[in-house]
Image (spheres, grey):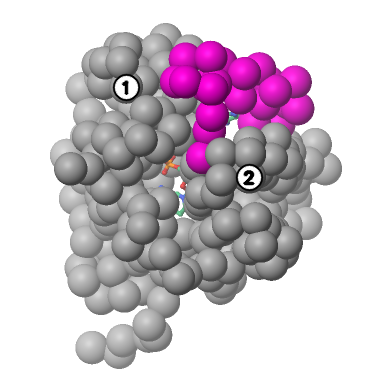
Amino acid sequence: MGKLDGRVVVITGAARGQGEQEARLFAAEGARVLLGDVLDERGAAVAKDIGEDRARYVRLDVSREEDWAAAVATAKEAFGGSVDGLVNNAGILRFNELTATPLAEFQQVVQVNQVGAFLGIKAVAPEIEAAGGGTIVNTSSYTGLTGMAYVGAYAATKAAILGLTRVAALELAAKNIRVNAMCPGAVDTPMANPGLLDPAGPTAESRDAMAELYRRVVPMGRVGRPEEIARLALFLTSEDSSYITGQPFVIDGGWMAGVSIL
Ligand SMILES: NC(=O)c1ccc[n+]([C@@H]2O[C@H](COP(=O)([O-])OP(=O)(O)OC[C@H]3O[C@@H](n4cnc5c(N)ncnc54)[C@H](O)[C@@H]3O)[C@@H](O)[C@H]2O)c1
């Protein structure tokens, strides 16, 4: 028996990184998953690899309300008429000093990370209610809880996601919908490690530099793996977390615990 038997879950940004691992793990635990992304070729390939009976891909730009309506319709049509889970995972990161950040860049990050999560809740929560209840997991970040220089737009949206999570949890609890947020530290995906996008993989030099960075700043001495974040998403989507709602969950190898001087 899987932890998500009978569940139908929409996962955004599922073509790669954490979203891909969430889709693979959820399907392995018995869920049927709708993978949404803007990377069509890659998303379709992941869904195909998981299997037609368990996974479908749909183009879902989370910042477009009409895409959400179409995605929900696709999930219902493909998987028996209802949806009872959502993982708002899609996100983008831009590095810039705040005072040098162009307005358009700031707004783009807000549009994807923050408006995208809002639209997801708005489109999917009524479906979860109609299904009798379920779960929403939002993806915030370490930077939603503490500062990090040069990621001002990103950090602002990740803090906003925690606000959204709390309000959604309060408003949806009576409808049997739990809403929680994950706050990952550094995770080894193309967002934190663009070298992964190179078919040959990151250069030895960049691998060494990153390993040294994480050894210094993360108490556990290493970067997180997307599979580890997927396991937290599974916990928050399954009955294992049945009495938890409205909470941020830090998953960061101890980074947030404090400063080590040794
Ligand atoms: N990697 C990290 O260190 C880290 C740390 C904390 C939080 N996060 C968060 O985790 C989530 C997943 O990121 P990841 O690490 O897997 O990075 P990633 O860049 O590998 O994956 C992000 C996915 O989101 C998709 N996406 C981007 N814009 C989209 C849009 N408008 N609509 C739909 N999909 C879109 C991308 O195509 C990609 O598949 C993000 O919300 C990110 O902010 C990542």
Q: In the visual, does 260 lie left or right of 100? A: left
What residue is at 40 percent from the left and 28 percent from the top?
A: 33
Name the residue nearer the viewer: 113 or 93.
113
Q: Residue at x 22, y 34 (%)?
A: 28
Q: Quadrant of residue 164?
A: bottom right
Residue 239 visible here: yes
Figure quadrant of the N terminus:
top left
Q: Which residues are magenta?
A: 59-84
Label 1 C-beta lies within 8 Å of the nearest ligand 1 atom: no
Classify mark 1: residues with Cα within 10 Å, few (<14), some (14-19) or many (20+).
Answer: many
| Mark 2 neighbour density, 10 Å: few (under 14) some (14–19) many (20 or more) | some
Give the quadrant of residue 175: bottom right
Give the vertical position of 152 relative to 4 (above or below). below
- The three-letter amino acid code for the residue at tag 1 is Arg
Q: Is residue 5 magenta?
A: no
Q: Nearer the viewer, residue 204 or 165?
A: 165
User: Disc 2 designates what residue?
Assistant: 129
Front disc: 2 or 1: 2
Sequence-wise, the earlier of marks 2 and 1 is 1
Q: Residue furthest right?
A: 103
- Cα separation, mark 2 vs mark 1, equals 22 Å
Q: Is residue 187 visible?
A: no
Q: Position of residue 174 (x, y in %)?
A: 66, 62
